[in-house]
Amino acid sequence: MHERSSVAELANMLRGELNRYSPGEKLPSSRALIERYRVSPVTVSRALATLAAEGLVVTRPGAGAFRAARPRAEEPRPGDTSWQEVALSVESAGDSVPRTVDASGVLATLAAPPAGALEFNGGYLHPSLQPERALAAALARAGRRPGAWDRPPVEGLAELRAWFAREIGGRAGALAASGVLVTAGGQSALTCALRGLAAPGAAVLVESPTYPGMLAAARASGLRPVPVPVDADGVRTDLLAEALRASGARVFVCQPLFQNPTGAVLSAERRREMIRIAREAGAFVVEDDFARRLVHEDAPPLPATLAADDPDGVVVHVCSLTKAASPSLRVGALAARGPALERLRAIQVVDSFFVPRPLQEAALELVGAPSWTRHLRTVAAELRTRREALVTAIRRDLPGLALSHVPPGGYQLWLRLPQGADEAALASAALRAGVAVAPGRPYFCAEPPAPHVRLSFASVAGTGELAEGVRRLRTACDDVLG
């Protein structure tokens, strides 16, 4: 092969044949290579030296050439991230709140339980209760709308803002569409409100107990949650006034309707008193209206939102479509009046620019279709059925757990454990028995008055799973509570 006798050509041909040989196997002798490729001994020697330099061949004087063993991947050097402990904990001058973020209370309701465990700790509707066909149809129609992929207004689509304004302000039209911002779900709106209305390091008043996601958002924003106790009629307004004076807080976050986790509805008298107290203190009330579309079939007429009765801008309203539709329909609203609205708008623009237009268009299609009203009626009937089934099972099989309030809305029951009971141990035992429940401690920003557990009846497939879940929880209670 006179025309192909270069060292590079021979090395390339031998490189292509190496896969015929196992690691450590001997290659043909130099004599055989000379005869096969009709090259000189010098060419063979130099070609083998090239492969040896590449780590493909090992040459042994007097023995020949062998295919090299496969190179072992070099172990990556383990990184040293210990420096981050200092960087993440250094506080700026004047900081009074540790720079830590604890999402454990939120993850307790977001994380899927192990396979086979029943989800009594969830915060969303079971897939069988979600309007999947209506959502799919809405998304398909939204994708065909002219300009569906264009950039939306930063405040949100005008039609969607108008729809939220009607929902929040009621038939009297107490809220204009211009007072509404479309947000990426309720949690985003809540975080925006906290950051916009309270300075870092300030106190923020919260219901006790309250939604762990709100506590996490407040602390992540550098705020200090201060508890105000809740009873069957909602927040204790006598203690609210005292807390505002003692803490100097200028923000109070509450859930007046089907409060999470207690299910309490703020009484009419306390509604008026709460707004009066906040107004006199120069404080905002952030109304988290998360459960209005989760009303049960047998509920009495719902009170108007706090925002509908507040022309002076004391109330900043937060709501969302997520709870009543799907965890992935992250579309909500933030409503405010006056300079507060401009500040909240600016924060939202800086944080996220805007909510993706296709998602807003899909939300519009969903709530504008006749199927949306039918879906809400179905959910109302099913939640009532599930609530009654769970209450019956608890009172029959879990007499040691006190159920003081049965709410006509929402998706959860709040149970008090015997004094001194270890709720964390009960939650662990329940998970071993095959049912995931939410311990009560994450719902308190200070020391809880008693151990509790929260049970959701919306995240399971139906009443059969509710009965089975209570049976499994009974096993855990027998092990832990005796």
Image (cartoon, grey):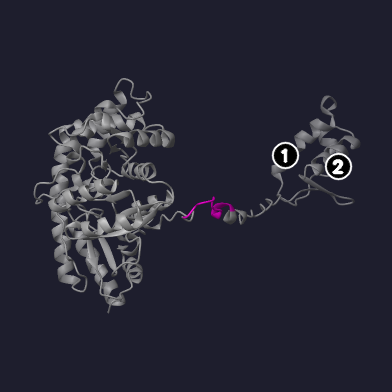
Above or below, 217 relative to 474: above
| Mark 1 neighbour class, 10 Å CA radius: few under 14, some 14 to 19, many 20 or more | few
Q: Residue at x 27, y 29 (%)?
A: 178
Q: What amino acid is at disc 1? A: Glu
Residue 208 visible somewhere in the drawing: no
Q: CA distance from mark 1 to mark 2?
A: 15 Å
Q: Secondary structure at mark 1?
A: helix
Residue drawn at point x = 37 percent, y = 35 percent: 343
x then y, percent, for residue 394: 18, 67
Span of residues in magenta = 87-96
User: According to the image, label 2 marks what residue?
Assistant: 30
The residue identified by callout 1 is 17
Q: Is residue 16 left or right of residue 42?
A: left
Kindly report the secondary structure that dominates the magenta region of the rendered protein: loop
Answer whether residue 92 is magenta in the image.
yes
Most foreground residue, 4 or 113: 113
Task: Choose the circle earlier in sequence order: 1 or 2.
Answer: 1
CB within 8 Å, label 1 to label 2 = no
The image quadrant of residue 406 is bottom left
Q: Is residue 283 left or right of residue 462?
A: right
Up/down of 139 relative to 195, above or below:
above
Q: In the image, what residue occupies the spot 10% across and 51% down? A: 299
Front position in the image: 207 or 443: 207
Whether residue 473 can be seen here: yes
Instruction: For mark 2, give the secondary structure.
Output: helix
**Position in image of residue 120 (x %, y %):** 27, 59
- Front residue of 337/46: it is 337
Q: Find the residue positioned furthest to the bottom.
A: 482
In the rendering, at what x and y percent does residue 100 appear?
47, 55
Q: Quadrant of the C terminus?
A: bottom left
Q: Is residue 344 above or below residue 275?
A: above
When asked about the image quadrant of residue 80, the answer is bottom right
